[in-house]
Image (cartoon, coloured by chain):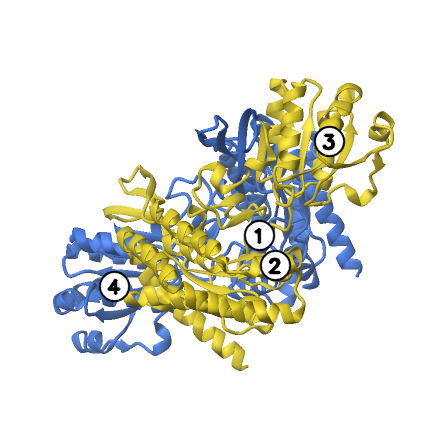
Chain colours: A blue, B yellow
Amino acid sequence: MAIKQQITEMAVQARRAAREMAALSTDVKNRLLLAMADGLLAKADFIKQENQKDLEAGRAKGLSAAMLDRLELSDKVIDAMVGGLHEVAVLPDPVGEVAEMAKRPNGIMVGKMRIPLGVIGIIYESRPNVTVDAAALCIKAGNSVFLRGGSEAIHSNLALAKVLQGAMAAAGIDPAAVQVVPVTDREAINVMLTLEEYVDLIIPRGGEGLIRFVSENSRIPVLKHYKGVCHLFVDDSAEQQMAVDLIMNSKTQRPGVCNALETLLVHRNIADSFLPVVAKALTEVGVELRGCEETCRILSGTKPARNDDWGKEFLDLILAVRVVDDLDGAMDHIVEYGSQHTEVIVTESYRNSQRFLKEVDASAVMINASTRFNDGGQFGLGAEIGISTTKLHAYGPMGLKELTALKYIVYGEGQVRS
Amino acid sequence: MAIKQQITEMAVQARRAAREMAALSTDVKNRLLLAMADGLLAKADFIKQENQKDLEAGRAKGLSAAMLDRLELSDKVIDAMVGGLHEVAVLPDPVGEVAEMAKRPNGIMVGKMRIPLGVIGIIYESRPNVTVDAAALCIKAGNSVFLRGGSEAIHSNLALAKVLQGAMAAAGIDPAAVQVVPVTDREAINVMLTLEEYVDLIIPRGGEGLIRFVSENSRIPVLKHYKGVCHLFVDDSAEQQMAVDLIMNSKTQRPGVCNALETLLVHRNIADSFLPVVAKALTEVGVELRGCEETCRILSGTKPARNDDWGKEFLDLILAVRVVDDLDGAMDHIVEYGSQHTEVIVTESYRNSQRFLKEVDASAVMINASTRFNDGGQFGLGAEIGISTTKLHAYGPMGLKELTALKYIVYGEGQVRS
């Protein structure tokens, strides 16, 4: 009950602050972001000192070296947060944009105005830099942000919030617009997810377990993606060297991320000639192949794929490879095993390129390009707060615009409805 | 368990059919809608006969005359459904529209393509015509629709679905794209709301109780509005005759709907002169006023408003009236009591009109126009499936576009990420 009361009270304050945030001018928001960046630099010692507490507790708990690395607020990480604040400060302000104004027969002008969403809840795991990166985007879009990080980063997150709030208070802006939940109990998440009266959107960032938990328990809309199982289909009309280059980039440029390639689909007509070429390139750089029966026949010695290798997010130098009969076979496979993240066709056929583009349901559908382009920066959004594979509100990388909504506006001259 | 299995199986079929629906050409969809209209006319006797079963059961259960009226599928209601199908057939098809194509520095072209949402679940109460009206919009937007109407209309809803499915089968389209859940048990709703793997969106239509139940229990995104508590603020700069006309239209043109006016806010500077004029006009047509202390002082004999009259959706010829200090006082009242539906300012002040437009958070914010314009038809959407007061995905009237999503598309020439 105490936790519920505490968190509800914080959310009420965030909601109140949201009204002030929505009315801030672009200049004021930009200056605030730069002041926050200055604050992080000025208070770097304090931040690192608080971060040490988390690192020590993490070592005592036996966290892995990778986990401790993600947890650490080194000078480099602090510089990156500062750079992020500067980048967001120069992005165009989406709030107030008016679009689609049109005159109705009775003379009223009807259009839409872009407005902040209100209060955005971010539920995240170990990386404390999310506290700053997410807050920056939410603030620029005129929102309050309500952050709940992992227990292992609690001192770091609270320290960062204190610095950000210091900059807000100095600018005369209600610091309740940026709050970190100080309760590490899991119960805090449960409470947050019921506060639909005060929180407009939840964005979970972390492992699939956390995201499923949030999604299944939230009364508030959730924007999320569970995983990225990206496919690339090599059509029989493909320019084969281009296909090899795209596969190599998609699979190996950064294998541990959600827009890396996980399954290669190859048209039966070219499998005999193409598979040996691409397999050579992949295995030379250490990629393990797991093939369908036909693939294993062509590439003798290839490890056979198990049923659960289709649709699997390896996040590693492993690639499932399947020979399909044609474009329809490829699209059937994607319907069955895809995660609606990123799907690519490599083709020189106009007809097949257009069919793939129209018929495949994913947040990004591409012709002759690397899966790795499905990213806010690459798509020109400036910065992203995550990728959505739910179609409602946002599908794909989410930038500043996805942290806003459109309301209808009407300019009248006294018109009444008859 | 049997119910769960049955409904899940229906949803799986709806999901499968959605892929076919998404690929249908505009022509095929339009012809299907017209064939459905012909089917309703050809099978009118069958529909009315099944509807009789519901009407008889309703009478036996003691439903009110108003409820029975909503339940009846008279020739007039059937004609209206036929007309609705014709109207939707001539609306532009939103699916496939491509927008915002832009070239990135590396030469890839990135843009967005409008696609169907997939499977739309509609949970509604007594009016069986919703079965046809909602199905028409979902089909035109390339979706499957999964309908769960009230138990009192079950024979009517199943009969309508049978006719629609007959038209689909005759056109060679999978009838699973339009299904009515035959289970009247409340459990059917509970099951539907957990099928996030197969259903993309839930739209509840009915009373606040149903909508809250759906909202609190759904794992699937829900677009909804609980109620419309619309305010109109008469600024001290308002043209007073215009204000009277707008108030009369907003309050009395159709008092029982969500975009009717419920609370009038009047600037203190003009209250003494304006309130008697507007009160006379309102009371002459039978509107009951419930005033704040100041209103009751000016209009002696006016019934004092109780605390719960602020923010109340009367849906009747009753109007709460409050005198406020200024624009900020009006906006404070709206923040506290508004339902984010429709808010109007009547003013001749440029500054106040712009502040109200920017700062008020509602699905439609209007200057010098009747609240009654917040409507899909009036806004030029062609037809609406409801109004959303949740800001995510859609805010305001929802037409065909709101039954679609945007995916990213990329045209490349072999580009890789460096």
Q: Which residue is mark 1?
A: B224
Q: Which residue is mark 2?
A: B215
**Residue drawn at point x = 49 percent, y = 58 percent:** B74
For mark 1, give the secondary structure: loop
Q: Amino acid at mark 1?
A: Lys
Numbered badge on residue B284:
3
From the top left corner, tell me how far across and down residue B291 is, in percent.
81, 34
Numbered badge on residue B379:
none
Look at the numbered discs 3 and 1 and tell me whether their residues touch, using CB distance below 8 Å. no
Specify the subunit that label 3 lies on: B
Whether residue B285 appears in this view of the structure is: yes
Look at the numbered discs 2 and 1 and tell me whether their residues touch, using CB distance below 8 Å. yes
Q: Which residue is mark 4?
A: A282
Specify the subunit that label 4 lies on: A
**Residue drawn at point x = 48 percent, y = 77 percent:** B6
Q: Quadrant of the N terminus of chain B?
A: bottom right
Q: CA distance from mark 3 to mark 2?
A: 41 Å
From the top left corner, tell me how far across and down residue B78 is, in percent.
45, 57
Q: CA distance from mark 4 to mark 1?
A: 50 Å
Instruction: State whether residue B360 is above or below residue B61.
Output: above
Instruction: State whether residue A214 is above or below residue B3.
Output: above
Q: CA distance from mark 4 to mark 2?
A: 49 Å
Whether residue B361 appears in this view of the structure is: no
From the top left corner, tell me how far across and down residue A43 is, in percent.
66, 39
Specify the subunit that label 1 lies on: B
Q: CA distance from mark 4 to mark 3?
A: 84 Å
Instruction: State whether residue A391 is above or below residue B367.
Output: below
Which mark lies nearer to you, 4 or 1? 1
**Residue drawn at point x = 25 percent, y = 75 percent:** A292
Q: Amino acid at mark 3?
A: Glu
Are dots 3 and 1 on a single chain? yes
Specify the subunit that label 2 lies on: B
